[in-house]
Amino acid sequence: MKEQFSEAFGNLVNKLQGWFNTTIEYIPNFILAIGVMVASYFAAKYVRKLVNKLVSKKVEQDSISNAISRVTAVVVVALGLFMALGVMNLGKALTSLLAGAGVVGLAIGLALQGTLANTFAGLLLSFRKKIRIGDWVETTGFSGEVMDINLKDFTLKEADNNIVIIPNKTILNNPLKNYSLTTKMRVFLECGVGYESDLEKVEQLTKSVIANTFDQVKSEDEVEFYYTEFGGSSINYLCRFWIDAESMLEKLNAKTKAIIEIKKAYDKEGINIPFPIRTLQFDNKLNVKAPDIQEVFSDN
C-alpha cells in the first residue's frame, strides 16, 4: 500500500513538473498570443473607422455603413484569435472551433433565412447607383419617394403621405420603375369635344395652349395631338407633350395645369366638352291613361 501511494505521488509530481515545464516553455508563445489579440483589437478599431468612412462615401444610409464596418471589425478580431491559437500550437482546438463555427453558422442561417435574405438584399440595394434616397419610384403596386433603405426593409412615402414598408428581398425580386433617373416625363391628356366642333380649330387651339403654358414646350410642333375615336357623346382625342420633371407629383401638377388652361380656352371659344349622354328609345306605344275608377267599380 505504501509503495502504491509512493508511486502515485511520484506520478503526480512528474505530471505537475511536466505541466510546469510546459507552462514555462509556452510563456513566450502565450505572451505573443496576447500581443496578437491586443494588436488585432486595435487593428479592428482602426479598420472599422476606415471601412465606415469609405462605405459612407458610397452609401447614404448610416445603418448599413455601420453594419458593414462592424462585420469587418469582427472578421479582424476572429483572424487575430485564430492566429493566437496557432501561435500557442492549439491546432486541434482551432480545428474544433472552426468545425463548431460551421455548424452554428449553418443552424443560424437556416433559422434566419428570411432575415438574412433581407439583409443581403438591403446591402445590394444600398450599393445600386440607380436607387437613392429621395428618388420617386414605383414597385409592387406602390409609388412614392424613397425615404430609407436599411438592412431589413425599403421605405416609401406615397403621394397621400402614407408610409409603405416593403421587405428588401421583395424589391430585389420585382421590377422597379425609377422616375428620378430621367429629367423628362411625358404627359398624356385625353379629352373629348362635341360633334359640332371644328376639329381643326380644336387641334390648333389645344396645341397653342400647351405651348404657351409650359416653358419646356418650345413650339406647337412639339405637342402631339391625335383624334382617337367617335365616342358615344364626343369625338375623343389624345394629347402628349414632354415636361422637365423627376417625380410623379410634378407630372400630376403639369397635367392639372394643362386641363385648367384648356378648359378656359375652350370656354372662351365656345367649344363644348359634352357630358356622357345616353338616349333611350321606345318603339312600342305605352298606354299611360289610367282607367276610370267608376268604370272599374261598376264592372265589379
Image: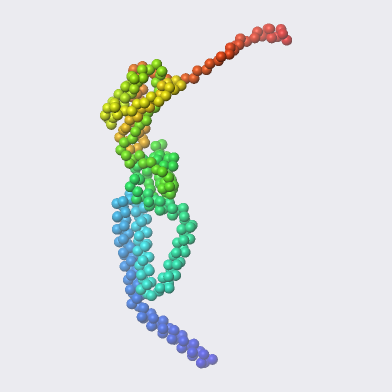
Give 229 or 5, whichever is nearer the viewer.
229
Residue 94 is situated, as x and y percent measured from the top left of the image, at 41, 70
Name the image quarter holding residue 15: bottom left
As drawn, 144 above or below 275: below
As drawn, 71 above or below 274: below
At x 31% / y 25%, what residue is drawn? 207
Give 30 or 268, whichever is nearer the viewer.
268
As drawn, 281 above or below 260: above
| Total numbered labels placed on residues in the image | 0
As drawn, 270 above or below 89: above
From this viewpoint, is residue 213 visible?
no
At x 35% / y 39%, what residue is drawn? 179
Name the image quarter holding residue 214: top left
Q: Quadrant of the C terminus?
A: top right
Give 226 or 45, whichever is nearer the viewer.
226
At x 33% / y 28%, what residue is drawn? 224
Residue 97 is situated, as x and y percent measured from the top left of the image, at 43, 68
Q: Residue furthest right?
A: 300
Residue 201 is situated, as x and y percent measured from the top left of the image, at 33, 19
At x 35% / y 73%, what residue is drawn? 87
From this viewpoint, is residue 95 visible?
yes
Residue 291 is situated, as x and y percent measured from the top left of the image, at 65, 9
**Colour pattern of the rendering:** rainbow
Q: Quadrant of the N terminus?
A: bottom right
